[in-house]
Image: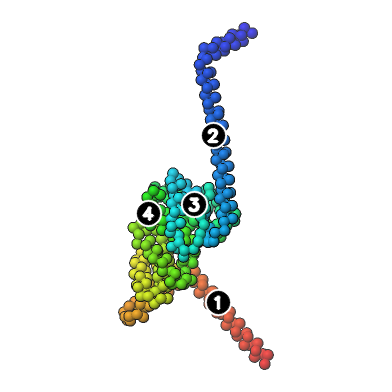
Amino acid sequence: MLSGLNGAAASVTERLLYPELFQLLGVIAAIVIPLALLACAAFFFFRMSATVQRKAAILAMREDQTPGNKILIGNIDGRSGGAASRKVMTALEERLPEFNFGSDFYMGAAPLTLEATDFALTRSDYKELTTVFEESGADLIIWGDTNFGPHSTRLCFATPATLRESSSSGFFSMDIARSPSDWTEEDFLSIAYVAGKRLRPSLGKPADFRAERLQPILQAMSTLLEAENKLEGQAGKELEDDFAAGALHVGETLNNKDWLEKSIAFRTKSLAKMSPGKDPIRWSQAKIDLGRAMCLVCEHKFEPAKLQEAMTHIREGIDNTKSDARMQLAEAGFASLQKAERMLADRRRFSIRWSV
């Protein structure tokens, strides 16, 4: 009993000895707890605000009756993400008409956060993109990350078609090896080309367009191909192939030797960087295009040696496709189809003779 009283007395004495400590703890608690509550409230507010803003942007895009394509700009992560988003919108506003035949389009921004990756979309990002496309009626959604690499920005482009393609990662990406503050007009043009190609995949099939309408697009592509900072990766390959096919189509359709010479010069240069074994179909296409362009030039001025060279290019291009598994499969299917057609024709002749 006595020891208990002594302990209580000691405790009271200790509290009296350190009153400043308890006062300090009280002050800290009075400051920290309200700040913590304020931080939680701010977090909840901004999260709700982003959700409301996103819903409003999606609804506005759905209800907008502007003719043409609808483009939704999602979040571009990183310290310069806000600047990158503004520059992407400026690039599209100023340069996209050069790749979509001057068609109208509508742009909107929404706080849509998706991962910029080297691989396929995650299941959650795929589901979110699908939902946003359905709710907004968008034709193209763009997002990215300004810290994807050292001073490098990755932009990702998705359309309903890229989500449906089983051979696709669900989106198309392009990298700009500079911070947004250092982007040039050529970078703006590159962004517009990649976006335009996603909106109009048929740019890779120039025969679908009138040659007169295609020439301004080819001029814009030529600017990119001659740029100091060229498009790299798959975007660069697409640009090269689209320009070469377009120049050949315009030269052949308009009987224009200048465009044919451009096609020859470009294909000769690009073939120096290709190998028949690495990408046989692309290499074969380049060889056949080169041979075709040289043949057409020979119609303007006949040169036997050049015509023989053209025939060699075409022959090599055709022969190289035979090693490709897809072409072998197509040939086997074509042979089987011919056999079935002959069988059907023989049965019909037999049926006619029998009925007689």
Residue drawn at the location 37% of the way across and 75% of the way down: 256
- State the residue position of label 1: 336
Q: Position of residue 314 (x, y in %)?
A: 40, 75
**What SS does tag 1 mark?**
helix
Question: Which residue is farthest top?
Answer: 2
- Is tag 3's residue or tag 1's residue first in the polypeptide sequence? 3
**What SS does tag 4 mark?**
loop
- Is tag 2's residue or tag 4's residue first in the polypeptide sequence? 2
- State the residue position of label 2: 39
Kindly report which numbered mark, 3 or 4, lies closer to the viewer in this rendering.
4
Q: Position of residue 338 (x, y in %)?
A: 55, 79
- Is tag 2's residue or tag 3's residue first in the polypeptide sequence? 2
Label 2 vs label 1: CA separation? 71 Å
Q: Give the amino acid at mark 2.
A: Ala
- State the residue position of label 3: 143
Whether residue 324 appears in this view of the structure is no
- Is tag 2's residue or tag 1's residue first in the polypeptide sequence? 2
> Is residue 292 found left or right of 53 in the rendered image?
left
Residue drawn at the location 55% of the way across and 40% of the way down: 46
Pointer 2: residues within 10 angstroms few (<14), some, or many (20+)? few
> Which residue is nearer to you in this view: 245 or 185?
185
Residue drawn at the location 61% of the way across and 82% of the way down: 344
Image height check: is 24 above or below 85? above
Kindly report which numbered mark, 2 or 1, lies closer to the viewer in this rendering.
2
Pointer 1: residues within 10 angstroms few (<14), some, or many (20+)? few
> Which residue is nearer to you in this view: 246 or 216?
216
